[in-house]
Image (cartoon, coloured by chain):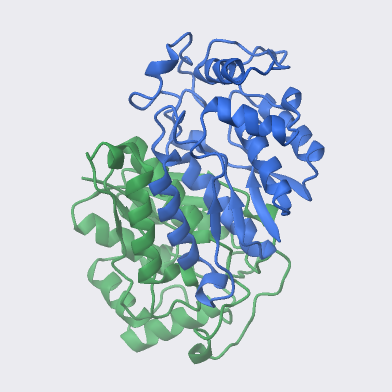
Chain colours: A green, B blue
Amino acid sequence: MKAVCLLSGGLDSATCLAFARREGFECFALSFDYGQRHAVELDAARRVAAALGAAAHRTAKIDLRVFGHSALTDDIDVPKGRDVASMSEGIPVTYVPARNTIFLSFALAWAEVLEASDIFIGVNALDYSGYPDCRPEFIEAFETMANLATKAGVEGRTKIRIQTPLIALSKAGIVQLGTELGVPFGLTHSCYDPFPDGRVCGACDSCLLRARGFREAGVVDPCA
Amino acid sequence: MKAVCLLSGGLDSATCLAFARREGFECFALSFDYGQRHAVELDAARRVAAALGAAAHRTAKIDLRVFGHSALTDDIDVPKGRDVASMSEGIPVTYVPARNTIFLSFALAWAEVLEASDIFIGVNALDYSGYPDCRPEFIEAFETMANLATKAGVEGRTKIRIQTPLIALSKAGIVQLGTELGVPFGLTHSCYDPFPDGRVCGACDSCLLRARGFREAGVVDPCA
């Protein structure tokens, strides 16, 4: 069984890939070079894909900056030192418009070429930091659409499934699952705004959520 | 009212843009540089956007070749001289996997940034040449998904509509509508496999469908 696995190089997508591998899938890992300020995560994605035995790893170059408007791709400051409890209120400036829709669309294209039935994405509804495209109802609607968009769907050959094994987990739950699955946490990268040498800032939403997850899981983060 | 209008530079998308303009929309035209062998259509898109008074025109560069597998982006030969009646049987080699899903996802991203409520796409179910992502049921499923994917949808501010004014028209009907709307047909480009100097091949599916449409509409094609 083949699966396309979206892989940012962060903790969540690495755990998601490890989960898909344990389920027995031949995994085709897909990353995006979308002009993100944290391009160091693409190096992390390559290392994680190799360490977890992905059958292939591709990086698709897309230009989301053509539409502007996000702290992850623009010159807006990434917020620092926010209270973790308030992160899920409202939609943060780090939101990239329609990002998961675009990423899943590319995954769908590759799945169609590979004749893969499954697409794995490490979205998380609990610690989703206010992103609309991390919610279960979005994922279900995407799956319905995907089955109408493709040759396999039209011809009734393959039912495309969008798999979200982390969707109901807390960050601590993801760390626990990743520990069970032997995810090489030290190879992952989560920071939105790393220093030029790749060191994490420790203060952006992503760093703070990660730190709390490891702390609550009672696991030492090798990147901290 | 703002709308994002997908614009390939061909007859259909030009007519679709002219329709959106007549409906009173401020139109933001979006084209894609996806490694297509017929890149001359991007010049056509620029000319058409300017002639029809688009408020802006952007070309997003994306790399669909990373997944391979289409005569429009690979080195597979574009089929020539096919019988028009047989084109809608099966899915042709010129099919690009998940192309409209990807294009609409980018349109959705720009719509979100612009706070536009409408996305126009010139798909056509009748002469759709076997592409699954040109069917009404696909468009409806995409619209449902789009309204769950976006900030505006989550906050209940904007209902995103995917508008397909050409979906039920024959190619002749599109030529008639385009004539009424004053579409500058001479600026459009439809050929899948043009000569290096931009002249059309006259024998690919797209050329043959276009020729038949003009003939049946009793209109002279300035590009023929």
Can the viewer see residue A8? Answer: no
- Above or below residue A194? Residue B122 is above
Q: Residue B4: x percent and y percent? A: 65, 52
Using the image as rendered, state which of residue B216 and residue B28 is in the foreground: B216
Left or right of B115, for residue B96: left
- Residue B160 image point, x, y percent: 55, 62
Which is nearer the eye, B124 or B99? B124
> Residue B118 at x, y = what percent?
61, 57
Using residue A25 as the reference point, say whether residue B54 is left or right of it. right
Picture coordinates of residue A35 (x, y %)?
63, 54
**For residue A177, above or below residue B186:** below
Query: Residue at point 43% right, 61% down?
Result: B144
Residue at image position (69%, 15%) is B220
The quarter of the picture where residue B133 lies is top left
Evaluate whether residue B94 shows in this view.
yes
Residue A98 is left or right of residue B9, and the answer is left
Residue drawn at x 75%, y 26% is B187
The answer to which of A157 and A6 lies nearer the viewer is A157
Q: Residue at (44%, 29%) from the top-left corner? A: B95
Position of the N terminus of chain A, as image quadrant, is: top left
Quarter of the image where one finds residue A124: bottom left
Front-most of B18 and B207?
B18
